Image: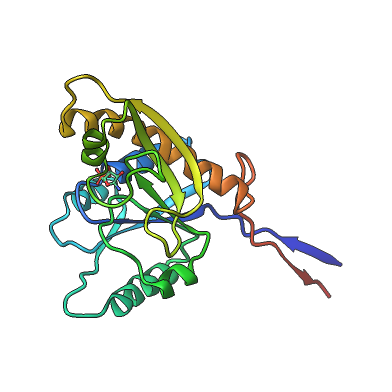
Amino acid sequence: MSTVVNTARPARLGILISGRGSNMVALAEAVHEGRIPNAEISVVVSDQANAAGLAKAKERGIETLVIERRRRTRAEHDREIAEALRARNIDLICLAGYMRILSSEFIDAYRGRILNIHPSLLPAFPGLDAQKQALEHGVKWTGCTVHFVDETLDSGPIILQRVVPVDEGDTVESLSARILIEEHQLYPEAVALVLENILGLSAGQPMTEAFEFTES
Ligand code: GRF
């Protein structure tokens, strides 16, 4: 007789941060509230020991790791991060204010499984200070983008975007704050969408590692 053994488990997310961690918190809250179904945040990794987001993750009972670059090459640093993620069976990696470019080896190892959030309507204003770039350019609308990470800087395939108006008299701070509100909504939506479509998950249908064995 053949029996299917269902070792259902939630999708395991790993979040990489360098600083404040407000998007990480938004993802944690969305998981907690079921807006990202069948998922858990397994680990938060920071390349900065003093990242404020680390305490916020710990408060929520999430495992945290500090993996600093020190004097290593980018590839060596990324290898340690990849090993930590692999050891925890991470399914999806969310960059949330992670201020480093990833090595091609890392991107290759997790191709299609790394997401990033960027505070502009890509492909406009990639790189640093996207909100300042938008103000300086004089655009009337900007926003935020969640995209897959590939070897290009902020140019991987777009998953979701939200539009934010630029107001008369906006400063970098006021515009950034208005975009950040939308980021906190958008990132969880995008993660839920990816889990549903890429990893084949949907509400009520947990990740399964079904396998068969034969009873004698
Ligand atoms: C956000 O604006 C995000 O779009 C960008 O870096 C910032 C991170 O903020 N990539 P936080 O650390 O999530 O608060």
**185 lies left or right of 130:** right
| Residue located farthest toward the top when viewing the structure as drawn | 168
Question: Which residue is located at x 21 percent, y 36 percent?
Answer: 136
* Residue 142 location, quadrant: top left
Q: Is residue 32 visible?
A: no
Instruction: Identify which residue is drawn at 64% across, 62% down.
Output: 209
Coloring scheme of the render? rainbow
Q: Is residue 182 visible?
A: yes
Q: In which quadrant of the rendered image does the C terminus lie?
A: bottom right
Q: Quadrant of residue 16?
A: bottom left
Q: Between residues 17 and 161, which one lies in front from this camera angle?
A: 161
Please state the horizontal and vertical placement of residue 215, each as a whole percent of the image. Answer: 81, 72
Q: Is residue 209 above or below residue 81?
A: above
Give the image location of residue 159, x and y in percent.
51, 44
Q: Position of residue 61 (x, y in %)?
A: 29, 50
Instruction: Name the residue at the left extreme.
Output: 50
Ligand 1 is in which quadrant of the figure? top left
Provide residue 41's location: percent of width, then percent of height: 40, 52
Q: Quadrant of the N terminus?
A: bottom right
Residue 31, by quadrant, is: top left
Question: Could you tell whether 151 is left or right of 55 in the image?
Answer: right
Number of numbered discs overlaid on the protein picture = 0
With respect to residue 195, does 181 lie above or below? above
The front one of 122 and 68 is 122
Residue at (40, 43) in percent of width and height: 122
In the image, farthest residue toward the right = 1
